[in-house]
Amino acid sequence: MKIQKKKAIPVFFLCLVLVLALFSGCGGTNQSSGTQSEDAETVIFTDSLGREVELPADIERYAVTGPLAQIVCFALDPDEMVALASDWSVEAELYIDEAYYNLPVLGQLYGGSGDLNREELAKADPQVIIDVGETKTDLEDDLEGIEEQTGIPAVHISMDTETASDAYRMLGELFDMEEEAETLAAYCAEIYSEMEDIMEQVGDDRTTVLYCLGDLGCNVICKDSYHAEVIDLLSDNLAVVDTPSSKGTGNEVDFEQILKWNPEVIFFAPQSIYSVVAEDSLWQELDAIQNGNYYEVPYGPYNWMGFPPSVQRYLGMMWMAKILYPEYATYDLEEEVTRYYELFYHCELTSEQYHDLVANSIPE
């Protein structure tokens, strides 16, 4: 039997193959974007602190450092969340699927409790721990401390109300869910732009506002604090103090100061004193109470104005603009709220649920 000889491969083609091989060998991971080659098992993800963190290329299990991150990440990828940072509220059971509502609670790194259970976190075996929100002092040390104690990589994604779109795009890269993340990012950009347009029409004629909370209603969310972003964006926030508190409890002031401020509109936090101010002789001295221009912030499954100051503040923006500037906020609030609940809570909100949410929150 004759053996047919193979034709010789030209030197040019051999060189071309070698060059292509060299390029493919050097292109396994792109450290600036977090992309990887098809067969790579890990990727280098650059977080908002500029830390280059090695992560699995396919994230299937993650944990969060606090409720702010919990709200943000839940909207994009609830199925891979292995645990909660804080319990859902009782009200949340109306909107959150049972599979997510009953996840174990590991505690949180920051906030009032700071009770993150590192042992239980390790047992939950997430592939990554995600922190979202304000870039706090010593955050890098905190995340590296978690990594050392648990052996689990941790990343920080910076987010405030204006930059939520950027945060979702980073999360989309992290989870390899760019298309789903872009839907949420585009929503945030759309609503924020609409609020800016409304305020451009309002111009200098901003409504004076106080956000009051606490058992006596004498704590206020002060101008220029992280928790006041929505209030500052959409109103003339009269609560100006020398040192705005970074805590969700705000700054405590005496009632004489509230009388001096005398805002046109008062927003009361959920579970504050909204229900009793109409009969209180002191509060009746304020124009907003006398004129019926006071409202309780909607709640369910979270406070719409923040606390934690996460993406549910987009609900707060739409609601607050509708209260203060109905002539410019011409959208249908129920339609917008229903859209938000579908996108961020994976919930088909009924009309009855909507009206229950805003029962004390819109003009009669």
Image (tube, rainbow, N blue to C red):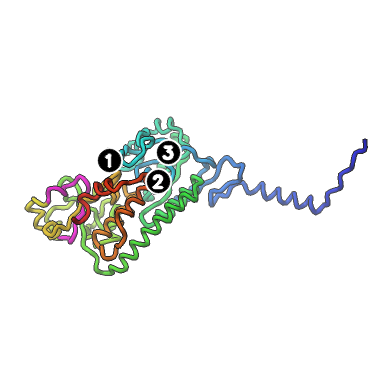
Q: Secondary structure at mark 1?
A: helix
**10 Å crowding of disc 3: few (<14), some (14-19), many (20+):** some
Left or right relative to 48: residue 30 = right
Task: Please tell me the numbered disc located at residue 91.
Answer: 1
Q: Would residue 36 be found to the left or right of residue 303 on screen? A: right
Which class describes the residues within 10 Å of circle 1: few (<14), some (14-19), or many (20+)?
few
Q: For mark 3, what is the residue?
A: 81
Amino acid type, mark 3 = Met
Tag 3 and tag 1, C-beta contact below 8 Å:
no
Magenta span covers which residues? 262-277
Quarter of the image that includes the C terminus = bottom left
In magenta segment, residue 289? no
Q: Position of residue 16 (x, y in %)?
A: 75, 52
Q: Give me the C-alpha separation between circle 3 and circle 1.
A: 20 Å
**Disc 3 versus disc 2: nearer the observer:** 2
Q: Determine whether, in the image, residue 180 is placed left or right of residue 306.
A: right
Is residue 131 in sight in this rendering? no
What x and y, as percent, mark residue 247? 27, 48
Look at the numbered disc 3 and give the secondary structure of its residue. Answer: loop
The label shown at residue 75 is: 2
Type of amino acid at the residue the image marks with label 2:
Ala
Of labels 3 and 1, earlier in sequence is 3
Distance of label 3 from label 2 (alpha carbons):
11 Å
- Camera-nearest label, 3 or 1: 1
Q: Quadrant of the N terminus?
A: top right
Disc 1 versus disc 2: distance between alpha carbons? 18 Å
Residue 80 in picture, x, y percent from top left = 45, 38
Q: Nearer the viewer, residue 15 or 245?
A: 15
Q: Quadrant of residue 6?
A: top right
